[in-house]
Amino acid sequence: MIIVIDGPAGAGKSTTAKAVAKKLGIQYLDSGALYRALTVIYLESGKDADSFFKKLKDKDITFKYTDEQFRVWLNEKDITDKLRSSNVADEVSTVASLLKSRERVNELMREAVEHDTYIAEGRDLGTAVFPDADLKFFMKADVNERARRRYEELLEAGEETSLKKVKQNILERDYKDSQRKTDPLKQADDAIIVDTTNLDFEQQVAQICSDITDKLELPIKQ
């Protein structure tokens, strides 16, 4: 079984999906982390596409949701702490726009969900990756609220930046994600819309859990 949450950067998809996974006792699949892992490879390749594609073939990418954290390994080296850095964030939309990147990530995700019940979050899961998902959500929020959340996340991680820069990065990423030729950011026609602008964290988690338990009859375990 697969439940998907799509939406733009900073809408709260990752934290919400993790909390829902915990409450329902299901697995969490972070597509954004997988694209960020590919972005680490892209940066190691000097942002050269040919070099990146070659390295992509040679890298063994593994991941696991453990202790309420989605961890990623490249050739058995844990790179999880690198995934939320600002230099990775600046390039992830470029990497995600590449067809070979999308094919690799989609392959990894489809293989994972064959064996368990997952909630996954991303940009195009309900339209391109899992069009037949058991349940689809589309989370959105005002850009100023999304920028504030992302800014606080970066400060908490010890990165020096400004709210203005974070907002600009989000606007640029929104544009790239929505305008890319391959599988752009798009709301699925059958998705349940969740606007988190004026919802606190507990409210948005409760709303999604309620929809899942009502429609799929999954019990809340925590």
Image (cartoon, rainbow, N blue to C red):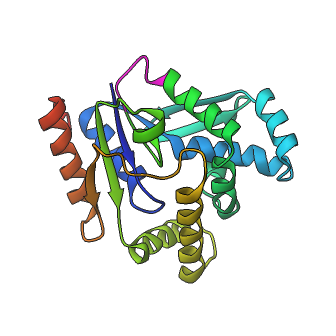
Is residue 69 shown above or below 90? above
What residue is drawn where x is 15% and y is 34%?
Answer: 215
Q: Nearer the viewer, residue 84 or 144?
A: 144
Q: Nearer the viewer, residue 63 or 41?
A: 41
- The magenta segment: 112-118
Is residue 188 shown above or below 218? below
Q: Nearer the viewer, residue 15 or 133?
A: 133
Q: Is residue 84 left or right of residue 88?
A: left
Quadrant where the N terminus is found in the figure: top left
What residue is drawn where x is 37% and y is 72%?
Answer: 142
Q: What is the magenta segment's predominant secondary structure?
A: loop
Residue 35 place in picture, x, y as percent:
61, 44
Residue 66 within the segment the image draws in magenta: no
Question: Does residue 78 appear in this view?
Answer: no
Residue 208 place in picture, x, y as percent:
23, 47
Residue 30 place in picture, x, y as percent:
49, 41
What residue is drawn where x is 18% and y is 30%?
Answer: 216
Residue 60 place in picture, x, y as percent:
71, 27
